[in-house]
Image (tube, rainbow, N blue to C red):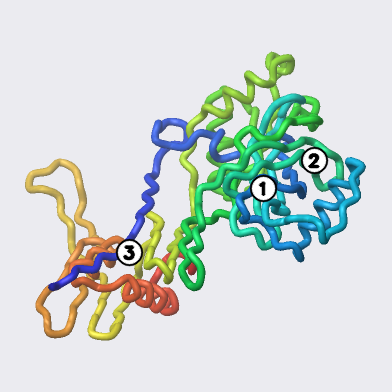
Amino acid sequence: MVMKRHLMVVMTVAAAMTPASSASGARVKDLVIVKGVRGNMLEGIGLVVGLAGTGDSPRSVASQAVQSYLRKRGLNIPATDLRMRNVAFVTVVADLPPYAAQGARIDVKVMASGDARSLRGGTLLITPLVALNGAVYAVAQGSVTVGGFSANGGGLANIQRNTPTAGRIASGALVEKEVKTKFLDGDQIVLALKEADFTTAFRITKAINEGLKGEIAFTDNPGAVSLKVPDRYLRNPIEFVSLIEALQVQADSRARVVLNERTGTVVVGGTVTLNPAAVAHGNLTVAVRRTLTPSQPAPLARRGDTAVVPNEQVRVKEDKASLQAVVATTTVDDLVNALNALGASPQDLISILQALKTAGAVNGDIEIE
């Protein structure tokens, strides 16, 4: 049986276009965050009870947490009298979104901190969730939903799927304290780019000024765009921000290749190209070359001049085989297609790309995960 191996490659393509004119661009809303509008991380430690013998061992830190919990309720029970296998000591985390009002509910994640085998079927007791300043902003409680399971038949027989020691509680936390958020400073609003880039910042600035027909936006660094709110929107800045967020902009990005040697996945940015080069890898030979060919206008054409056009080709050859791949442009996509035709493994492509980068033939960054 002959098995064909194919390289798992994801290509991202970026097309050149006018920032505010193409519907295929990204919204400004997806490229920036409004400075001052941000969430907050909360965490707490608590107890999950009601487990079917899958909780912490008696010698774990959970016994101290249970004793402390009981003492607060007027009960003083020695650790030797506690049966801990139905209780788990857990860490609870949540993201408090901006403008979350008092009384709103948010999701929480629950993770075992001791040696519990599973949180399946457990219920989280009341757990305060605090921020870095130590203030309590939410309180969590509820039944834990676990996506995995674990079964032990004794001896070496053990089956586990996913992670049974981590789960979540949908709408499991009640917001007790609001976070004051302010995004309008006088008549100024700042848009912070999620990924700083000179070209993207310029395109956002241009799209805003052209879309709202005025000198509203300006930028002096690639990470932020400042806005001067027109007088007519000072009483309703929400409307002004919504108009800005709806504008279309083509985001720019650096040429980048991401390699994952564990899974054999290769992600190639659409702007990555190859310079002329030749690589021999095992029984594979890869050649990238450039030739110049004349381009002339059609006979009797009224317009057009003769020009010299570079013609770039990628050739891949495998020993003891006549199969070759010849393409017209020099891109990583062409190289991948040529190697796929030969049945090259993902490791072959990863090694070849790394060698090409070392030789200076890859126009882009290579990141290895």
- The answer to whether residue 131 shows anywhere in this view is yes
Q: Nearer the viewer, residue 274 or 101?
A: 101
Q: Is residue 236 positioned above or below 45 on the image?
A: above
Image quadrant holding the N terminus, namely: bottom left
Viewer-side label of 2, 1: 2
Q: Residue 55 at x, y = what percent?
A: 66, 56
Q: Is residue 29 positioned above or below 11 on the image?
A: above
Q: Secondary structure at mark 1?
A: strand
Q: Quadrant of residue 171?
A: top right
Q: Quadrant of residue 317?
A: bottom left
Residue pictured at 57% horizontal, 42% vertical? 145
Q: Residue 318 at x, y = what percent?
A: 18, 80
Residue furthest to the left: 299
Query: Label 2 crowding class (10 Å Cα cut-off): few <14, some 14-19, many 20+?
Result: many
- Mark sitting on residue 332: 3
Residue pictured at 23% horizontal, 67% vertical? 340
Viewer-side label of 3, 2: 2
N-term mark: 2 or 1: 2
Question: Mark 1 highlights which residue?
Answer: 221
Q: Amino acid at mark 2?
A: Pro
Q: Quadrant of residue 188?
A: top right
Position of residue 272 in the picture relative to residue 186 (left or right): left
Measure the C-alpha gap from mark 2 to mark 1. Answer: 41 Å
Residue pictured at 69% horizontal, 47% vertical? 48
Q: Is residue 339 positioned above or below 240 on the image?
A: below
Q: Residue 115 at x, y = what percent?
A: 67, 62
Measure the C-alpha gap from mark 3 to mark 2. Answer: 52 Å
Question: Mark 2 highlights which residue?
Answer: 128
Q: Is residue 55 positioned above or below 225 on the image?
A: below
